[in-house]
């Protein structure tokens, strides 16, 4: 069902990318497109759809199983149920997204979305191929166990994904303050995609930015420091396979040289950049070094 | 069958969008690096690591800076740059073939870094 909603929105995605490119070309809108970068983003989106089929059956079966053992029966026709799932799904997304950035095993699949050094609507379509295998979909199981029908969960997930498409743009500046306070906006999400130490691991929100404000991960975009996009160690070419699997390959190489269970655990579930001797830098270390230079 | 049709239509859309992006010519301008622009990029990518020497690739698409025992490397990728920090000895001893200096990449995201080499390599400040 999730695929259905997103599939329905796909023509809109294509049209919006066309509009953004033409606006940049003829109206000097703020947007940069590099053809090979765009190709990688779009092929990763296409591949993600195909890869999702591999695990779709397992995800659907697990969701149905959880729903069959539900605590309550929540009617899809009740307005309050939609209000409840809106907030609960958005909170679940925040937790997923934070996990996907702060623990390497899940970062290995999510890093794909961040590998572009551009921030445009095509970047929104740069989606993971390995998310299903990484198992983050399990985070949504409690909603089914609570009693939300699987169709309702899938619909809200689709709405969230579609919402997050339009915020991947530099063409929109800052919105009126009440909107910026409540919602995830292009400005907030630019921060999320930035690799400046100041901005690393911030603004995990899906639709509502309130979760970041509540849990201390909010960082506003500043005029003082423009976001520089991409990852801390950017890709050195436009190889699609490398773009998809590089972090998994890096984990494999690290595990091959691990000397203890602690090393294995650290390489798999430590923060990205973790190393036994501290010779590499995690986001926290980069932020600390940046903060020290400002004192 | 319907998935195959949607997938095929999506593939056509992808190719059309890539063509449109290429036609629009709205990539970031990346003129060949000169010393001031390379130093600005180096300062952005490697803040707090002052350079004792800087070498520009022959075609202006990359640079190597020396900061202590580290080589700070910039290589153009499309209209952006990939940056890596390597031991200086790895840069100094890197092989040159077909006019290209091939540096060992530091990770799976960049197995190799290649820069067009000219007569200026290695920089005069570098020990032999």
Image (cartoon, coloured by chain):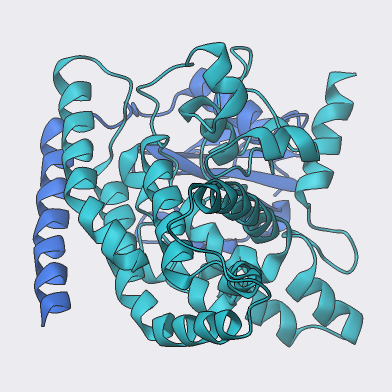
Rendered residue at 56%/71% (across/down): A137
Give above or below for A143 relative to A5: below
- Quadrant where the C terminus of chain A is found in the figure: top right
Residue A14, percent from left and from top? 18, 46
Residue B126, percent from left and from top? 69, 41
The answer to whether residue A92 is visible is yes
Q: Is residue B51 left or right of residue A182?
A: right
> Which of A107/A34 is in front?
A107
Residue A84, percent from left and from top? 59, 50
Q: Is residue B55 left or right of residue B128?
A: left
Rendered residue at 69%/66% (across/down): A104
What colour do you see for chain B? blue
- Quadrant where the N terminus of chain A is found in the figure: bottom left
> Which picture quadrant has residue B24?
top left
> Which picture quadrant has residue B90?
bottom right
Q: Is residue A294 left or right of residue B43?
A: right
The answer to whether residue A236 is visible is no
- Which one of the lettered chains is coloured cyan? A
Tally of marks? 0
Rendered residue at 53%/50% (across/down): A234
Residue A12, percent from left and from top? 20, 44
Give above or below for B116 relative to A154: above
> Which picture quadrant has residue A237?
bottom left
> Which of A41/A294 is in front?
A41
């Amino acid at each position: 069902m999730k695929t259905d909603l997103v599939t329905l929105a796909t023509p809109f995605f294509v049209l919006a990318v066309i509009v953004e490119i033409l606006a940049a070309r003829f109206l000097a809108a703020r947007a940069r497109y590099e053809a090979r970068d765009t190709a990688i983003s779009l092929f990763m989106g296409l591949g993600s759809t195909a890869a999702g089929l591999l695990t779709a059956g397992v995800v659907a079966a697990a969701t149905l199983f959880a729903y069959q053992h539900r605590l309550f029966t929540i009617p899809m026709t009740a307005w309050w149920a939609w209000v409840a799932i809106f907030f609960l799904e958005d909170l679940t997304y925040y937790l997923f997204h934070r996990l996907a950035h702060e623990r390497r095993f899940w970062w290995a699949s999510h890093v794909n979305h961040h590998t572009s050094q551009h921030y445009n609507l095509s970047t929104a379509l740069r989606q993971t191929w390995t998310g299903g295998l990484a198992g983050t979909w399990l985070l949504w199981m409690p909603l089914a166990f609570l009693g939300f029908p699987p169709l309702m969960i899938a619909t809200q997930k689709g709405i969230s994904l579609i919402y997050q498409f339009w915020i991947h743009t530099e063409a929109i500046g800052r919105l009126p303050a009440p909107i910026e306070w409540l919602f995830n906006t292009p400005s907030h999400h630019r921060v999320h995609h930035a690799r400046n130490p100041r901005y690393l691991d911030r603004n995990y929100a899906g639709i509502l930015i309130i979760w970041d404000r509540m849990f201390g991960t909010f960082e506003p975009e500043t005029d003082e420091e423009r976001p520089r996009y991409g990852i801390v160690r950017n890709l050195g070419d436009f190889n699609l396979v490398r773009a998809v699997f590089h972090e998994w390959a890096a984990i494999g190489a690290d595990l091959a040289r691990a000397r203890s269970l602690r090393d294995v655990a650290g390489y798999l579930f430590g923060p990205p950049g973790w190393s036994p001797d501290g010779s590499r830098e995690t986001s926290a270390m980069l932020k600390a070094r940046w903060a020290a230079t400002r004192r | 069958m319907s998935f195959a049709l949607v997938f095929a239509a999506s593939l056509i859309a992808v190719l059309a969008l890539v063509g449109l992006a290429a036609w629009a010519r709205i990539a970031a301008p990346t003129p060949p690096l000169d010393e001031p622009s390379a130093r600005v990029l180096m300062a952005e990518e490697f803040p707090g690591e002052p350079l004792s020497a800087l070498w520009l690739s022959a075609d202006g698409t990359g640079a190597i800076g020396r900061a202590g025992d580290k080589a700070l490397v910039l290589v153009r990728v499309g209209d952006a740059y990939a940056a890596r920090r390597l031991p200086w000895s790895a840069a100094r001893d890197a092989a040159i073939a077909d006019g290209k200096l091939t540096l060992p990449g530091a990770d799976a995201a960049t197995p190799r870094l290649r820069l067009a080499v000219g007569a200026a390599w290695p920089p005069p400040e570098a020990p032999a």
